[in-house]
Image (cartoon, rainbow, N blue to C red):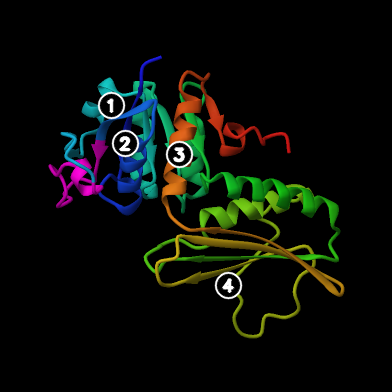
Amino acid sequence: MSDMRLIVAGAGGRMGRALVRAIAESKGAVLAGALEAPGSDLLGKDAGVLAGLPANGIKLSADLWAMSKDADGILDFTVPAATIANVAIAAERGIVHVIGTTGLSGSDNAVIKSVTNRAVVVQSGNMSLGVNLLAAVVKRVAKALDQTFDIEIVETHHRMKVDAPSGTALMLGQAAASGRGVTLDEHSERGRDGITGARRPGNIGFASLRGGTVAGDHSVTFLGPFERLTLSHQAEDRMLFAHGALKAALWAHGKAPGHYSMADVLGLSDI
């Protein structure tokens, strides 16, 4: 099979540049396009140079329709509005859409899922092997421990992150809720401040810290009578997310239309 031709959305951003580097460092994929927002000062710049590599001749453009004509997939770690705009074009072109964008609303996710009867979408709040293994373990532990154990999720990210809780924290919360057989929307507790009253039994708590250049730290703590169990993951470089996204794209190439997750990519969906 020939190399998979991939577009990087948000190619001028930190994650976009990491994705360009990951493609250059890996076998089985080539960069077919570099997408950037209309009006960006980076339009027309060489994607390789921006990523700290030799020039590759791929210029940043805002025209996804044109560049997707000869592409097989798009790696999309942007912002909700951009991702939703990309969904329709990717589905129309019939290319794989790997979505790592966080901060998506319920209606955004409904739009994404609406195209999966005819398009291949791989979507995850985190593309790393370690985090997805952590989510599988969290689900098992939550299932094993009853509601005398409170669940608290703490995440830390760099100062520039704009959404909270992080997509990864919410993914871990979903895993815990699934293990407990409840819905996260009805058992989520966020942003304590002031006189909050006693903790509601069965809720899953979230706390978000922001500062510095942290790529991503997440911990899930089960607090029971006289004991605590903490499961955690520390991301040391965003390149791990880039290589995970590339793995997802290569896995999805040629798959039947559907909505997939990194658990599917890594063979963890039955855990």
Q: What percent of the width, then of the height, locates residue 9?
A: 31, 41
From the viewer's perspective, tell me whether residue 195 is left or right of residue 105: right
N-term mark: 3 or 2:
2
The label on residue 191 is 4
Q: Is residue 234 above or below residue 192?
A: above
Q: Is residue 3 above or below residue 243?
A: above
N-term mark: 3 or 1:
1
Residue type indicated by callout 1: Ser
Q: Which residue is mark 3?
A: 245
Residue drawn at 73 percent across, 47 percent down: 178
Q: What percent of the width, then of the height, locates residue 37?
A: 23, 46
Residue sitting farthest toward the bottom: 195
How many neighbours does mark 1 have within 10 angstroms: few (below 14), some (14-19), or many (20 or more)? many
Q: Which residue is mark 2?
A: 24
Residue drawn at 54 percent across, 26 percent down: 258
How many neighbours does mark 2 have within 10 angstroms: few (below 14), some (14-19), or many (20 or more)? some
